[in-house]
Amino acid sequence: GAVVSQHPSRVICKSGTSVKIECRSLDFQATTMFWYRQFPKQSLMLMATSNEGSKATYEQGVEKDKFLINHASLTLSTLTVTSAHPEDSSFYICSAPDLYNEQFFGPGTRLTVL
Amino acid sequence: LAKTTQPISMDSYEGQEVNITCSHNNIATNDYITWYQQFPSQGPRFIIQGYKTKVTNEVASLFIPADRKSSTLSLPRVSLSDTAVYYCLPAGSGYNKLIFGAGTRLAVHP
């Protein structure tokens, strides 16, 4: 099946700094990608839909100025957590649908904010 | 989007068959039912998808009754490595976003 990668796999940062997470579709193009956040022992929560060439669509309650999304190309979407705080510590996962609309998930990025 | 209800957790033993049922009373006509598996600190992995009746692949079987208001994921002869969280999601055609429910935490014991 198709492969979606994320980088970095884990990151530790100081409170107040910004962190960028990359999501790449390795062998297919994705005009749409999705970003999720998952806290321990909880389900995935959809944060936003990343659209190539246009603005991202954010779910209710997700601050667009805090979680900046850029879909720079048909294979790359980035999520930047700005001015991160300890409560932003979480597992961030992206997904991308292929040509047949089967969704493939990245391996996730563990963010720890000190 | 259709809301799903699954058991929060299930326990089983190696070699047993496990059936996880998901109810989705308000599933849309054009929605398929997809099941994902997630291990700790990993992204979800696609297991199986179906629209109606029965679908089988090398990993699992999926049973969907005629009214499509529920579905049952069947894992034959589970092993310890099947310990994971299992999610059922109705998903339509097109690049639809997936909304995850709480999922079912399956624990397989020796």
Image: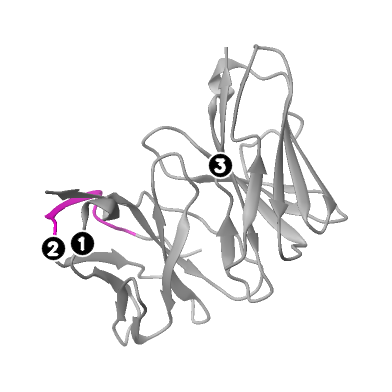
Residue B4 horizontal/vertical position (percent): 37, 60
Circle number at residue B15: 2
Which span is picked out in magenta? B5-14
SS at mark 2 in the image: loop
Circle number at residue A108: 3
Q: Earlier in the sequence, mark 2 or mark 1?
A: 2
Separation of marks 2 and 3 at Cα, in angstroms:
31 Å
* A26 relative position to B38: left or right: right
Q: Nearer the viewer, residue A11 or B1?
A: A11
- The picture quadrant where one finds residue A41 is top left
* B56 relative position to A72: left or right: left
Q: Are marks 2 and 1 on the same chain?
A: yes
* A96 relative position to B51: left or right: right
Residue located 56% across and 73% down the image: B92
Circle number at residue B78: 1
Subunit bearing disc 1: B
SS at mark 3 in the image: loop
